[in-house]
Image (cartoon, helix red, strand yellow):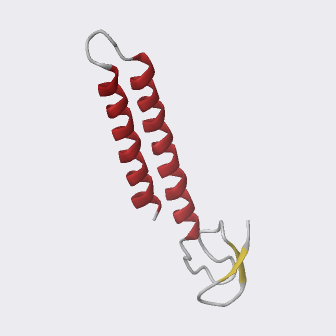
Amino acid sequence: MALIECRECRQQVSDQADRCPNCGFANGLGTANAARQKALAQFAAVAVASVFLIVAGNWNAMPMFVYIGIGFLCLGVAMLLAKFVAG
């Protein structure tokens, strides 16, 4: 946690705060942190699903490279999602 300068009143404010406690100006930094955490959670969920596809796939139905390819495709989508949502 760091202190930053409020864009409105120039007082020191926590970077986790949604609003300045001095003037009430919405700095929006807490919202950005929440979006970043949500993106990381989504990335983790897709990564776990990808690993499950790779490990628990039915190897008799399709060749292994198909499952590995699907897993890496899901990881790539998760990385793009995390990048664009988190900013």
Measured from the top left, where is residue 52 in percent x and y? Answer: 44, 24
Indicate left or right for 22 with 76 as reference.
right
| Count of residue discs | 0
Which quarter of the image is occupied by the N terminus?
bottom right
Q: Nearer the viewer, residue 25 or 16?
A: 16
Among all residues in the image, which is located at the extreme bottom? 9
Q: Residue at x 44, y 58 (%)?
A: 83
Picture layout, residue 10 above or below residue 15: below
Q: Nearer the viewer, residue 46 or 2?
A: 46
Q: Position of residue 82 (x, y in %)?
A: 44, 53
Quadrant of the image containing the C terminus: bottom left
Q: Position of residue 2 (x, y in %)?
A: 73, 71
Residue at 67% from the left image edge and 90% from the top image edge: 10
Horizontal arrangement in the rendering, residue 3 relative to residue 8 (left or right): right
Residue sitting at x 46%, y 28%: 51
Residue sitting nearer the eye, 36 or 63 = 63
Name the spot of residue 6 as percent of width and height, x first: 64, 84
Residue 7 placement: quadrant? bottom right
Q: Quadrant of residue 16?
A: bottom right
In the displayed structure, would residue 49 be above or below residue 17?
above
